[in-house]
Image (spheres, rainbow, N blue to C red):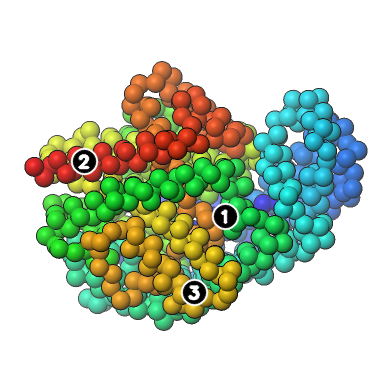
């Protein structure tokens, strides 16, 4: 049973941030209120439905005919919808203000109760995986409605070699609330509560606002922010090292019992992607470091009149870039127009996010940092969270998260079990939405300086998405391998972090004392081990996809929507075939990386 939660200070509206009226979530489409009759009704229904499901089906799956097995799967799916609705509501309320103890308690109670109620369902996947292949194939051949679920069954049965006894699986399910999820909450609440004293700032800032200063035009402000981050991370580094040591060890124990061949294997299985495809992506990106990040940052140092770059220069605006604050209405129009230029239908699908309370945009006390699009359940709609501060990059973040939202809306027609897209493909629509927005802005550039600024910004975003995320992936691989040998000190983890940073960013960088702790704030390492390669996968895939679009492939728009509508019902090979693309071909990744290199070529040519 999946318990969906969103993967993840100062109020810009109240402070007159100049962004216009920023939207807030209206969560009443999930439940009217935490104490509503509807919430209590669904919680009670979930309890009885899980009990009834186990009483009706446990120990009996092998004897069901095709119609009976279909009814069983549909009953399980209905339970998944209600559990998902409850946890989505609790999770989204919590992320609006992680410092509110009432919200934290409400979410913990919801998670405890849902976990307890769904424990009787653990048998389903275990018993289903014991069905003989020939028997299941015969049932699928008898019922087209049942055969629709084959991709779900294939993903379940991929776990067969790693399945434990029924009793152990139930224990792990029951115990999960005091395992990884408890450490995740500790991390989230600690991060949300951190405050940073930045030199030159009158008041202490939270993490989001401090990180935002790393893109300020004033180099002294950027340095002050970086040093404030380092100081606070250092004070808390033992706690963060404890979180990582515990989670990595828990994962190692689970993986050992499940006979997983590597720490990454479980992620590959859930992403429905072959390990060799991920390895080909990783190797292609690492081999391209010199022609991508190393080359670009040398160019950036030249633009900034510097011999070397410091970490606080990595995301600095270019000297030619006029400081710009983008109001919310302008951001909305920019993204909507770019979507509409590709297809009016795309803009139409995005519109309710702006008008129906599906976006929470402002930076507020206690709000989780970062941005995400949470699909909730297929019977409701997604919600987008932003921390909008009016930077040009925030416009790209809006384009990105709306892409997720549109994808989730289109895939919802597949139903709860088939709509969920593997992470490797989940970034497709989001990165494509960014690319559409970027290309629209590039077309409208009126001067060489404006074009240069846009190209440089896009290259930096792509380096952050591809190079930085693969460096993150390598860090995680090293971290989990080292933890398997024994407990890691903060210095041990710091050294692993620095080994990938120097390799990926290049020799133009100097690294300040304290930067070695910056692994501490990356939430993906805590919430979703090895998630990060999905960003690079998505960027490379979209670059190749956009090249096909630009080449004028007949019917591209229809093929693109069909791909998004498929959700998790097809393998990546099947989804990419209509575009003439194959991610298992090592040359595939070079196509995407060549697009980034081409942008850098153009930037270098502008120097002449």
Q: Quadrant of the C terminus?
A: top left
Depth check, front residue: 48 or 128: 128
Task: Choose mark 1 or mark 3, whichever is in front.
Answer: 1
Quarter location, residue 480:
bottom right
Q: Residue 66: where, in percent of width, then height?
A: 83, 31
Q: Secondary structure at mark 1?
A: loop
Q: Secondary structure at mark 3?
A: helix
Q: Is residue 424 visible?
A: no
Closer to the N terminus: mark 1 or mark 3?
A: 3
Q: Residues within 10 Å of mark 2 (few under 14, many from 20)?
A: some
Q: Residue 110: where, in percent of width, then height?
A: 67, 62
Residue at left 23%, top 43%?
Answer: 600
The residue to which callout 3 is attached is 240
Measured in 3D between alpha carbons, the distance from the residue under mark 2 to the one under mark 3, in whole angstroms, is 41 Å
Closer to the N terminus: mark 2 or mark 3?
A: 3
Task: Choose mark 2 or mark 3, whichever is in front.
Answer: 2
């Amino acid at each position: 049973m999946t318990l969906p939660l969103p993967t993840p200070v100062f109020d810009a509206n109240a402070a007159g941030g100049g962004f216009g009226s920023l939207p807030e979530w209206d969560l009443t489409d999930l439940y009217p209120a935490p104490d509503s009759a509807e919430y209590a009704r669904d919680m009670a229904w979930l309890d009885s439905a899980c009990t009834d499901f186990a009483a009706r089906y446990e120990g009996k799956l092998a004897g069901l005919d095709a119609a009976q097995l279909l009814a069983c799967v549909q009953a399980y799916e209905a339970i998944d919808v209600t559990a998902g609705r409850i946890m989505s509501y609790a999770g989204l309320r919590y992320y609006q203000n992680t410092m509110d103890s009432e919200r934290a308690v409400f979410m913990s109670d919801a998670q405890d109760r849902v976990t307890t109620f769904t424990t009787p369902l653990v048998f389903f996947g275990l018993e289903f995986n014991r069905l003989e292949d020939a028997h299941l194939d015969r049932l699928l051949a008898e019922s087209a409605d049942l055969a629709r679920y084959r991709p779900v069954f294939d993903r379940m049965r991929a776990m067969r070699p790693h399945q434990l006894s029924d009793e152990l699986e139930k224990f792990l399910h029951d115990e999960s609330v005091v395992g990884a999820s408890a450490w995740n909450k500790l991390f989230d609440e600690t991060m949300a509560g951190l405050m940073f004293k930045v030199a030159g700032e009158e008041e202490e800032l939270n993490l989001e606002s401090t990180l935002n200063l790393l893109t300020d035009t004033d180099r002294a402000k950027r340095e002050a922010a970086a040093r404030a981050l380092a100081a606070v991370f250092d004070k808390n580094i033992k706690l963060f090292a404890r979180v990582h040591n515990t989670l990595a060890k828990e994962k190692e124990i689970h993986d050992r019992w499940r006979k997983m061949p590597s720490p990454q294997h479980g992620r590959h299985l859930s992403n429905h992607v072959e390990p060799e495809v991920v390895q080909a992506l990783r190797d292609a990106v690492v081999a391209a470091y010199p022609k991508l990040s190393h080359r670009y940052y040398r160019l950036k140092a030249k633009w900034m009149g510097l011999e070397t770059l410091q970490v606080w220069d990595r995301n600095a605006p270019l000297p030619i870039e006029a400081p710009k604050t983008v109001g919310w209405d302008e951001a909305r129009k920019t993204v909507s127009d770019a979507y509409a230029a590709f297809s009016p239908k795309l803009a139409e699908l995005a519109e309710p996010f702006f008008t129906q309370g599906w976006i929470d945009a402002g930076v507020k006390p206690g709000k989780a940092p970062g941005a995400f699009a949470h699909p909730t359940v297929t019977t409701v709609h997604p919600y987008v969270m932003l921390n909008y501060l009016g930077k040009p990059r925030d416009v790209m973040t809006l384009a990105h998260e709306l892409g997720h939202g549109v994808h989730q809306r289109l895939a919802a027609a597949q139903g709860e079990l088939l709509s969920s897209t593997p992470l490797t493909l989940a970034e497709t629509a989001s990165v494509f939405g960014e690319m559409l927005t970027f290309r629209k802005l590039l077309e409208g550039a009126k001067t060489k300086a404006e074009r240069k600024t846009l190209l440089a910004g896009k290259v930096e975003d792509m380096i952050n998405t591809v190079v930085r995320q693969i460096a993150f992936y390598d860090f995680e691989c090293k971290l989990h391998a080292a933890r398997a040998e024994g407990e890691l000190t903060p210095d041990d983890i710091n050294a692993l972090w620095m080994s990938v940073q120097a390799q990926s960013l290049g020799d133009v960088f100097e690294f300040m004392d304290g930067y070695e702790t910056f692994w501490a704030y990356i939430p993906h390492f805590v919430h979703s081990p090895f998630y990060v390669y999905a960003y690079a996968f998505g960027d490379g895939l979209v670059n190749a996809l956009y090249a096909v679009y630009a080449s004028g492939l007949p019917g591209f728009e229809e093929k693109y929507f069909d791909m998004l509508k498929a959700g998790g019902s097809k393998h990546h090979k099947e989804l990419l075939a209509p575009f003439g693309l194959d991610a298992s071909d090592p040359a595939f990744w070079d196509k995407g990386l060549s697009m980034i290199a081409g942008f850098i070529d153009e930037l270098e040519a502008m120097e002449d």
